[in-house]
Amino acid sequence: MEELENNGISAEIYYTAGLDDQGELEIIEGSTEPRIGRNSFGLQPAFSFLVESRGIGIGREDFERRVNAQIATHESILKQTASHARQIKNLVAFERLNLIKKGLMPNDSDPIIIDSENKELENETLEMVDIATGTVQDIPVKYLSATDAEPTLVRDRPTAYLIKPGYEEIAEKLKAQGLKGFKLPKNVSLPAEAFTVTSKEGAGNYEGRELAEVETELTKKDITFPKGSYVFLTAQPQTNLLSLSLEPESVDSYTTFGYVPSEVGQELPIYRFTIDPKKSKMKPFLK
């Protein structure tokens, strides 16, 4: 952003603006939702950028300047990437290997953040143009930071997730994100954690799908998984994406989006496996 400002282009960390319930100006910095492209790509994991120019409701005003800002930004990103290519490749490779290791180790106090909320920062201001005087002023704002977001639900990472047969669509969606899984070739009894829905509320509509906000209770039990059940090990680079897709309380889980049916009092067809797969009855099916 410093380079942009040196070229006379104003820039800020991405945010959206609106009014809160008291009518005060509210600035929401980004979001932690995995449905958003930049976050989804980041969960691969990878470096991911979102660059937006102001323009909602202003037509072609400052069109050339806005295009110039985009070009300058992307040129800078490409140059920085080329200049640090080796470091970036090494860092991404290291983090992917680290995530694989996390999935291999059961009971290692490795928490995954299922849900979080932006944190309100105190004494924040935002530069704005006073349309009456044409001067730039610092205006006090309510600022909700995604950078400093705080966890609201955390669970230990399992070593695998199991999905009962009949949910091929879910398995295909996970595979489309780069995740690898396999089917059990026969009935297998395994210890697992089961999700039982304790509450469910409507959470609006998103791109044509009715959303549901659920809460669950975990129960450890021995379960006979039928032949054809899917197994997705968490020892994969996209392990965090896997958890955020399958943990039902995640704001963008397949339960939230209705791909997994849910009713209060019922057990979901998704299960957490928390021991070493190589020391279980799953071992013969591991490649």
Image (spheres, rainbow, N blue to C red):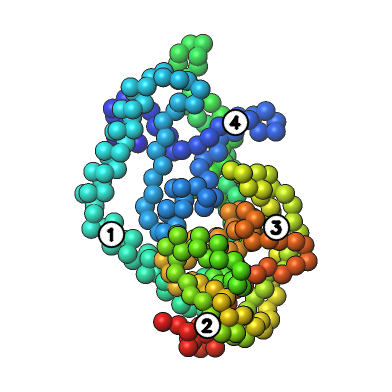
Identified by mark 3, the residue type is: Val
Q: Give the residue displayed 37% in from the left and 56% down from the top.
A: 46
Identified by mark 2, the residue type is: Pro
Q: Closer to the N terminus: mark 3 or mark 4?
A: 4
Near-viewer residue (146 or 177): 177
Mark 3 Cα-neighbour bin, 10 Å: few <14, some 14–19, many ≥20: many
Residue 18 marker: 4
Q: Give the residue displayed 63% in from the left and 47% down from the top.
A: 209
Q: Secondary structure at mark 1?
A: helix
Q: Give the residue displayed 66% in from the left and 82% down from the top.
A: 223
Q: Label 3 belongs to which residue?
A: 214
Q: Is residue 150 left or right of residue 241?
A: right
Mark 4 Cα-neighbour bin, 10 Å: few <14, some 14–19, many ≥20: few
Q: Secondary structure at mark 2?
A: loop
Which quadrant is the C terminus positioned in? bottom left
Q: Label 1 belongs to which residue?
A: 89
> Which is more foreground, mark 3 or mark 4?
3
In space, the residues marked 3 and 2 are separated at their CA atoms by 32 Å
Q: Label 2 belongs to which residue?
A: 185
Q: Give the residue displayed 48% in from the left and 11% down from the top.
A: 133
Q: Secondary structure at mark 4?
A: strand
In space, the residues marked 3 and 4 are separated at their CA atoms by 27 Å
Residue 101 visible (yes or no): yes
Q: Closer to the N terminus: mark 2 or mark 4?
A: 4
Establish if 175 lies above or below 103: above
Q: Secondary structure at mark 3?
A: strand
In space, the residues marked 2 and 1 are separated at their CA atoms by 38 Å
Q: Position of residue 129 (x, y in %)?
A: 47, 19
Q: Specify the farthest residue to the top.
A: 132
Q: Is residue 204 left or right of residue 1?
A: right
> Which is more foreground, mark 2 or mark 1?
2
